[in-house]
Amino acid sequence: MRKQTGFTIMELMIVVTIVGILGALALPGLKEWSLNANRTAALTEFLGSLHLARSESVKRNVRVGMCPTKDAADPEAGCAESKSWEIGWIVFVDADGDMNLGDDEEILAAIDAIHTDFTLASSTGDIALDFRPNGRLETNNLAETVDFNLCDSRGADQGRVISVNTSGRPQSGVTAIDGSKPSC
């Protein structure tokens, strides 16, 4: 007689039950991990664009603007009249200094929309930013500091603030430069 090897149906049912329980326990943590990873990606993308705009303004010795786009699929459509940046944004050489993309102005970068679970908006009402040739920031409402709030469904406790002061240097954190939490 040959010895039979394999699993009984009862052993298989026990293993499937254990795997199901472990999966159910891991699912909430996996969703949290996914939201954190997407938040980090959006934050890095936006900070990278701010750094690009500032460095290009100094390197080229021209004004470089950054604004939310009207249409993420067509960056040449121009700047949106909105303080919501999650639809995407453009970085461009702002030759005329009007903080709006003109027909003859060069687009340096066009960023598509961030993950759909997130919002990214200026809390100071700024629609566009302009970096001068010395790297300093100029805003359309002449604010001392511009704060952008990156938020998701978890609220202000998990939100992040990207602050840019008049020196043009961006920074991010759980609070703004003045210590306030994100307004989500």
Image (cartoon, rainbow, N blue to C red):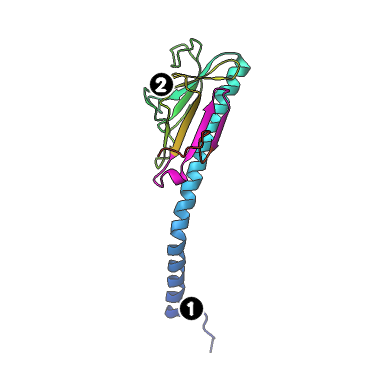
- The residue at the point 48 percent across, 31 percent down is 147
Name the one closer to the observer, 62 or 14: 62
Mark 1 and mark 2: span between their CA atoms? 64 Å
- Amino acid type assigned to the residue bearing label 1 in the image: Phe
Work out whether 28 lies above or below 144. below
| In the displayed structure image, the side of residue 153 where residue 165 appears, left or right | right
**Residue 58: quarter of image:** top right
Q: Secondary structure at mark 1?
A: loop
> Magenta stretch?
151-172
Point out residue 118 in the picture as x, y percentages from the top left corner: 41, 40
Q: Is residue 86 magenta?
A: no
Secondary structure at numbered mark 2: loop
Query: Mark 1, mark 2: which one is toward the viewer?
Result: 2
Res 123 quadrant in image? top left
At 43% across and 80% down in the image, what residue appears? 10
In the image: residue 56, left or right of residue 31:
right
Circle 1 sits on which residue? 7
Q: Is residue 116 left or right of residue 178?
A: left
Q: Position of residue 45 (x, y in %)?
A: 52, 34
Q: Which mark is residue 79?
A: 2
Q: Looking at the image, do the residues carrying marks 1 and 2 touch, with CB atoms under 8 Å apart?
A: no
**For this view, does 105 lie left or right of residue 80?**
right
- Please determine whether, in this image, residue 118 is positioned above or below residue 2: above
Kindly identify the residue that appears in the image at 44 percent across and 31 percent down.
Answer: 112
Total residue callouts: 2
Q: Amino acid at mark 2?
A: Cys
Q: Position of residue 184 (x, y in %)?
A: 40, 39
The mark that comes first in sequence, 1 or 2, is: 1
Density class for disc 1 (Cα within 10 Å; few <14, some 14-19, many ≥20) is few
